Amino acid sequence: MKKFFFTSIMLLLAIVATAKSYKIGPSSVTGTNFASINDAMSSVSAGDTLLLDKAYKETSEQTVTKTVVIIGNGFDTTTSTIAQINSLSLKADGIQVNSLYVTKVYFYNKDCRLYRCFVGSWASWAGTSDATGSNSIHSCYFTGTIKGTSAKAIFDIQNTILYTSTSNVIYNLINSNICHCVIYGNAGSSEYLIKDVTSSSIIDNIIVNSYSSYKNHTISNYGVSSMNTIHHNVMSGFLNTTNYPLNSITNSYYLDGICKCSGTTVSGTYFELSANSPALNYASDGSDCGIYGGLYPYVDYGRPIYVPYFTNINVPAKATNGTLPISVTVEVQNK
């Protein structure tokens, strides 16, 4: 056993020591190594990092077949200078995707992670049979859904915003964890926001159905046979408060009164809790429900760690004594 442990440690250190970073982007950008993620796959090795240039805009499907780290530059949609990918397929264990704007993500393996990403349409389990291992979605922003397809998915979903105008926002999961999220959608008479999710934990979330006539259609599988753990959520309604009493049920089908609802939703500040919010200190660990409590507090615009960004630029209307004093404030995302 000692020999096996020593060999494993040495192998890990060897991988870390030889890991390299590569820049992905148009050939016109200085220092670019590859034009696309697909082009890089034949040359990179497990443990390498792919840094996406802000000018990288990819409309064709990109398939990741090695255990690499992919880093974009966040998803501040008020600017066009962010890397964007239409479709991303993860076909190796342990792939890390950080701070990326992507429309669709397909998981084929296990132990992969989306972190601080924007997902426009969906993240789905694409395997033909039920997942046997978990994938993670942490501190992300969705305008679409997280789902299994014909087979059930296993996801660890934490500190993530799902702000949509649809139903079945989280669908067809098993043995999963949904924690410290904001889930907002529109589910009608036979629909729910969280549907066909079993043997899972649904804890410390804010869950609001904007369809006023069916605001209690938040979670479909609430019976004891579903084997779900459901508590310390703030919800617009729930069909079984008898078996699950430790949830705060509001009378509103809006986020107003729970969150501040000011500013842009994608920045995250929209979901900061209001002064008298029922989500304040209501989480199971004594923290706040929603995206700013828990293990992976939401980071505005998915800014990657240690990357500087502008917070203020002040340019006077006219020069003074022949000079134009311009002030620029720059901060670094340090966590």
Image: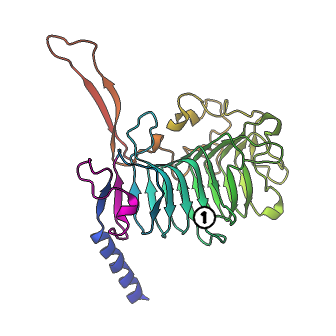
Helix, strand or loop status at disc 1: loop
In the figure, 36 relative to 218: above or below?
A: below
Nearest the camera: 3 or 49?
49
Q: Which residues are magenta?
A: 25-53
In the figure, 268 relative to 46: above or below?
A: above
Nearest the camera: 324 or 149?
149
Instruction: Residue at 83% x, 44% y: name it.
Output: 189
Q: Is residue 76 left or right of residue 198?
A: left
Instruction: Residue at 30% x, 30% y: name it.
Output: 329
Q: Would residue 98 be counted in the magenta stretch?
A: no
Nearest the camera: 249 or 191?
191
Counting from the top left corner in percent of width and height, residue 268 is at: 52, 38
Q: Is residue 287 left or right of residue 90?
A: right
Q: How is the image coloured?
A: rainbow
Q: Would residue 26 be counted in the magenta stretch?
A: yes
Counting from the top left corner in percent of width and height, residue 13 is at: 32, 74
Residue to which mark 1 is pinned: 126
Nearest the camera: 47 or 9?
47
Q: What secondary structure prevails in the magenta region?
A: loop
Quarter occupied by residue 51? bottom left
- Check disc 1 and give the amino acid type: Ala
Quarter occupied by residue 221? bottom right
Counting from the top left corner in percent of width and height, residue 152 is at: 68, 65
Instruction: Residue at 63% x, 38% y: name it.
Output: 280
Counting from the top left corner in percent of width and height, residue 118 is at: 51, 46
